[in-house]
Image (spheres, rainbow, N blue to C red):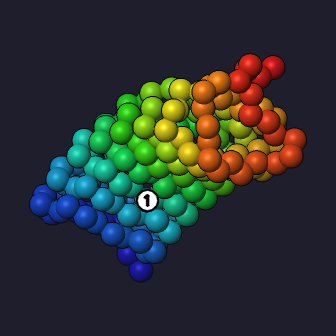
């Protein structure tokens, strides 16, 4: 099994799939500046910084991530980070995001006001206490169940979300949440 990999000499990589290894470290990602798609799912990564401005897709589900920094990946269109140990995630600079899958983490708070193109948000099984999706006019699929402290999600008056997966005790409110 591969535990550490150095990709620094692969400067022309466009797609990299390292799914289902035993990786604890990926060295040299910053040298892969042409990378558009990166799959590091089903590994043992605990922290990760991805600073690749052209990267459009990142799949890092099923790792041990406590820390994820994607600030420098400003072209990111999809981020799949389900089943990790993330407590926070800053996606303020990821304004191109359309798909954000964060279920089964430990996230208590997330700011999505800069992610106006987001259409799919799965953030069930976290520690959310509040969630505001009122600035996401393109959102059509929302999954928020199994957040024991989350009872209300703020939406905009004109917002229509086609698919919502929630618990009976959870409501969508145009009047904000107390």
Toward the viewer: 118 or 75? Answer: 118
Regarding mark 1 in the picture, which secondary structure is present there?
A: strand
Residue 75 lies, in percent from the top left, at 29, 42
- Taking the image as shown, residue 8 lies to the left or right of residue 108, namely left
Residue displayed at 73% across by 20% down: 176
Toward the viewer: 174 or 45? Answer: 174
Toward the viewer: 45 or 72? Answer: 72
- Taking the image as shown, residue 136 lies to the left or right of residue 21, namely right
Residue 3 lies, in percent from the top left, at 40, 70
Pick the quarter of the image with the C terminus.
top right
Image-quadrant location for residue 106: top right
* Residue 22 in sight from this viewpoint: yes
Residue displayed at 31% across by 50% down: 56
Image-quadrant location for residue 84: bottom right
Question: Residue tagged by mark 1?
Answer: 59
Residue 85 lies, in percent from the top left, at 61, 51
């Amino acid at each position: 099994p591969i535990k550490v990999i150095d990709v620094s000499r692969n400067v022309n990589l466009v797609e990299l799939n390292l799914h289902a290894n035993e990786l604890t470290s990926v060295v040299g990602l910053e040298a892969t500046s042409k990378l558009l798609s990166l799959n590091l799912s089903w590994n043992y990564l605990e922290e990760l910084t991805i600073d690749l401005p052209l990267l459009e897709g990142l799949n890092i589900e099923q790792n041990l991530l406590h820390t994820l920094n994607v600030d420098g990946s400003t072209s990111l269109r999809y981020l799949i980070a389900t089943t990790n140990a993330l407590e926070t995630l800053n996606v303020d600079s990821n304004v191109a995001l359309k798909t954000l899958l964060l279920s089964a983490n430990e996230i208590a708070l997330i700011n999505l006001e800069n992610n106006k193109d987001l259409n799919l948000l799965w953030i069930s099984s976290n520690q959310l206490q509040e969630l505001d999706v009122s600035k996401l006019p393109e959102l059509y699929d929302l999954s928020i169940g199994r957040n024991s402290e989350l009872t209300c999600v703020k939406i905009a008056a004109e917002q229509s979300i086609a698919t919502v997966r929630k618990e009976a005790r959870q409501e969508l409110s145009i009047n904000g949440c107390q």
